[in-house]
Amino acid sequence: MHRCLHVYDVVIAIVKHLSLMDRRSVGKDVQAVQTIHSMTLTCSVLYEPAMDVLWSSLLDLTPIVKSLPPHLWFEAEKQVEESADCVSLLRTVRLQAPPQPSDWARAVRNAARVKSIQWNFRRWNRGFEVRWALGDSAMHALALYSSENSRPLLSNLCKYEWYWEGLDPQYFPYIPSLCSDKLESLTIIAHTSLPTASVLPFAHAAFGVLIARCPKMRELLLYQTSYDDDTLVDLEDKVYASFFTEVAKLPCLQSFESHHPLSPSELLLFGRLPRLRNVAMTLYCDADEGLLSTLSSRSLFPELQSLDIEHDNLPTMIQIVEAIASFSLSKLTVSGIPPETPAAQLALLFQTLLPHKYLSYLAVGGTREHLDPGLALRLSLSHLYTVQCEDFRPLLSLHHLTEVFISPQSFALKLDDAMLEAMAQAWPRLQILDIASRLPMHTAPGVTLGGLLPLSVHCRRLVMVYIAVDVVPPSKEARDRLEEEVKRKRPPCHLSMLTIHYGADVDSPEPVLREMADFLTDMFPHLQDFDTSHCLPQRRDQRLDDEEDDIRQHWERFKEVVSEYCAS
């Protein structure tokens, strides 16, 4: 055997390369595991590295129980009919007899290799949904071993994804005893179909012990898999209210994400954590605005790098952004902005971003609910909900922006060629630009086809654009400028996806359509995916409906012409 294979790190790199798994294909998953297993049987030099990779990540604890002598455990199967068209296979691993101390050697060695575990009790096998679970005796035996030996069974576990589904709540307190103080990442996915009364006491006990055992925890993600509001309020409010207080004591916590709403007092607790860098949270709809109004400027999140916040009150979110003390904020997502929010508040949000010079990702969005057509029409006709060109000017000082998503569904956005060129010059690192309103359009957009040229000239890394454009033949000045750029033989813009948002017709003769398509593909020679999205006002008159159909057909024809040029 070559001497390089005696180097542990080299063998680990080889085995990891062989273990690359395509999660979309169970067959490839199995094949990768079989490949690594074959390596363990090759020779003693490859055994340890291959076993380390093979056991580094598990989906559940059943493989550890199966590491016990085979006469101690067995599998029990039964079909569970969840609905008329969904039948699951529940496969439970149970113990026939309590393991003796000498029976644990192999299981303990394998458990010590586990670095991450996903407590996911669902797998797909031969087209059926298969649930795996541990029997009462098996779960109790694992916890009992940890307590009797004064050491956790999963002694090197660093990342743990805990799914509530499939686990009897009475076993929740056993979970912390299996984990060591090396745990750095914890994901809790609360399946709220479990009976609330039986879950609460066990969840309280498990959370408290787990947080106390893992002072080095750096990442905490709290999700839920049910949208039953009554259950969520009853269950999560009681569980997480005390849990958030404990979490705020973690000295090393760097990333926190919660799908469960936080109260203002809980927000203040997390805002004072010294090392917190990444936060994704939702605030209660009826949050105490008085408490948040006492926030002073630059008083929260001293090390924050990424903030994702959702709330139904934009002024409150502006207050939180103003309170950020960190100078290294690079990612900001503001969502949940409700309809009938004045555009002046969005302009104030942009003004608030001025201190964050290193911001590279900005996303501003509305609620997930679909707007009523009547309300959308009323908003689109009011200047009160229209964001003007000058409102975007504070963003021009953020020269590190690479991804910009400004597409709130309840605002109309007014852009013109001059502002788009200013954006292109201010954001040379730009890669993704989505800046188009979803409201009905009553006039032609201010950005013309020739106005896209600055994006091609200044934003060479651009790959995707979604924008409202008035597709008219480019001016002679724009054509001459494009010709000069082509002659300079600079590296072309990498834009490959372009979606044009339209509200006006593109009824032009075929030669003119081809001229505009040629201009577009000369600007963006790497363009491959061209699409259109209409935002025409809702019509009630049949004649106007026919006119709308004609407009869509004309755009479809332009799309076909551009696709022809892209293919050539």
Image (spheres, rainbow, N blue to C red):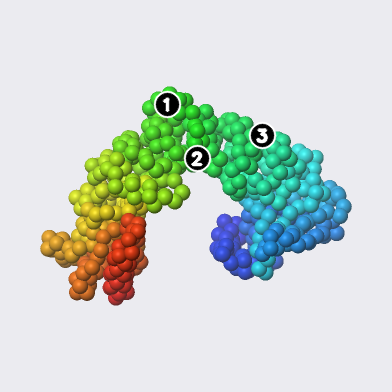
Q: Earlier in the sequence, mark 2 or mark 3?
A: 3
With 479 as the anchor, is 30 left or right in this view?
right
Residue drawn at x 33%, y 47% as measured from the top left: 378
Q: Earlier in the sequence, mark 3 or mark 1?
A: 3
With 184 as the anchor, is 370 left or right in this view?
left
Is 456 located above or below residue 343 in the figure?
A: below
Label 1 Cα crowd, 10 Å radius (few <14 / some 14-19 / many 20+)? few
Is 320 located above or below residue 383 in the figure?
A: above
Which kind of residue does numbered mark 1 sit on?
Ser
Q: Quadrant of the N terminus?
A: bottom right
SS type, badge 3: helix
SS type, badge 1: helix
Q: Which disc, if any, is residue 281? A: 2
Closer to us: mark 2 or mark 1? 1
- Mark 1 lies on residue: 293
Residue drawn at x 52%, y 28% as measured from the top left: 265
Whole-Å distance between the Cαs marked 2 and 3? 21 Å
Closer to us: mark 2 or mark 3? 2
Q: Which disc, if any, is residue 348? A: none
Q: Nearer the viewer, residue 252 or 341?
A: 341
Is 50 located above or below residue 324 in the figure?
A: below
The answer to whether residue 252 of the structure is visible from this angle is: yes
With 289 as the anchor, is 355 left or right in this view?
left
Task: Report the residue that reaches farthest toward the right.
Answer: 97
Q: Which disc, if any, is residue 208? A: 3
Residue drawn at x 72%, y 48% as measured from the top left: 167
Q: Nearer the viewer, residue 189 or 275?
A: 189
Which kind of residue does numbered mark 3 sit on?
Gly
| Residue 54 point in image, percent of width and height | 65, 59
